[in-house]
Image (spheres, helix red, strand yellow):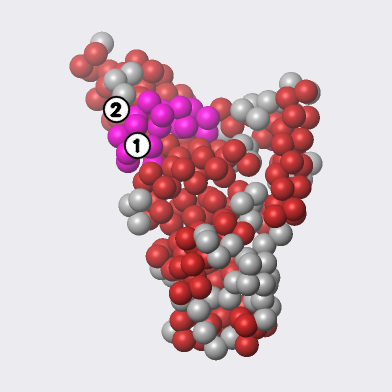
Amino acid sequence: MLILVLRRLPEATDLDQNASPDKPAAQRLADKGLPAIAASRVKSWLKFKLQKLWHFMLEAKDLRHTAAAGYKIKKIFGQNQAAARRPAPVDIKPQEAKDEQYFLGLIKKDPKNLDNYDSLGRYYLESKDYAGALDIYDYLSQHAPANPEYHAKLAFCHYQEKQYEQAAGHYQKSLALDSLQPNRYYNLSLAQEALGKFVEAAQAAGQAVTLEPGNVKYYLALANAQVKSGHITAAQTSLRKALALEPENSSIKIKLAALVQPHE
């Protein structure tokens, strides 16, 4: 249906023919009949430089990008408005009851607007059509490489398709652009763990804990990676911190007891 509708878009013949024709994502979408988009590389470059300047300012004020203080201040002063407008893939919120044709209609009206493609991508994500969403966000990440949201959503699609290497790579790209997203460190940890890279998984989960030390889920991911990398004592510490946050959590108690008994 997507192929048939988009191949009939009259705007498709009026767009810039030089818009990343050699990019794999662009070619795949072109094969589906999606119109090419004239990407603004200057805009992406400027946005990337502004993000780098923000991180420099944080470090100059001793609010490093790995510190919880920097994370909180950025949230307070609204420096992460783009992320606030577009939730992380694991926290997708349902849209109003609209079908695929509605979002295809948005593209038909304004095929140069990347947000219309993002809307279609989010529709596919909510419909659990991860293969369809993957093509959309692969294309968007090529045209707006300085947008961390597109990389994060693309990473999520790769993870759902069990393409863990690609998922880890795009979570890393997203975090390089916006390092104050603890849930993406958590997702990166899951991808690294799926690849059997337990040390790296523990490091990523540790970053999530640093940014949001009150989140039990991050401590559990950290403890799990620490156990698999052979750091039992460190895992015990992580579980005790998680239990301090949720003293009545029986699952944490069981995990901790299973580690303590053989080693103490």
Image quadrant holding the N terminus, namely bottom left
166 relative to 77 in the view: left or right: left
Give the answer, above or below, for where 102 lies relative to 216.
below
* Residue 195 lies in the magenta-colored region: yes
The magenta span reads 191-208
CB contact under 8 Å: marks 2 and 1: yes
Let me know if residue 214 appears in the view.
Answer: no
Going from the N terminus, do you reach mark 2 or mark 1 first?
1
Q: Is residue 112 left or right of residue 139?
A: right
Q: Which residue is mark 1?
A: 193
Instruction: Depth check: give the residue in front, 209 or 158.
Output: 158
Is residue 45 in sight in this rendering?
yes
- 177 left or right, relative to 251: right
| Amino acid bearing label 1 | Glu
Could you tell me the amino acid type at mark 2? Lys
Instruction: Give 151 or 127, whichever is nearer the viewer.
Output: 151
Looking at the image, the residue that sits furthest to the left is 262
| Disc 2 target residue | 228
Category of crowding for the residue at label 1, using alpha-carbon neighbours closer than 10 angstroms: few (below 14), some (14–19), many (at least 20): many
Relative to 9, residue 257 above or below: above
Q: Position of residue 48 (x, y in %)?
A: 70, 44
| SS at badge 2 | helix
Q: Secondary structure at mark 1?
A: helix
Q: Residues within 10 Å of mark 2 (few under 14, many from 20)?
A: some
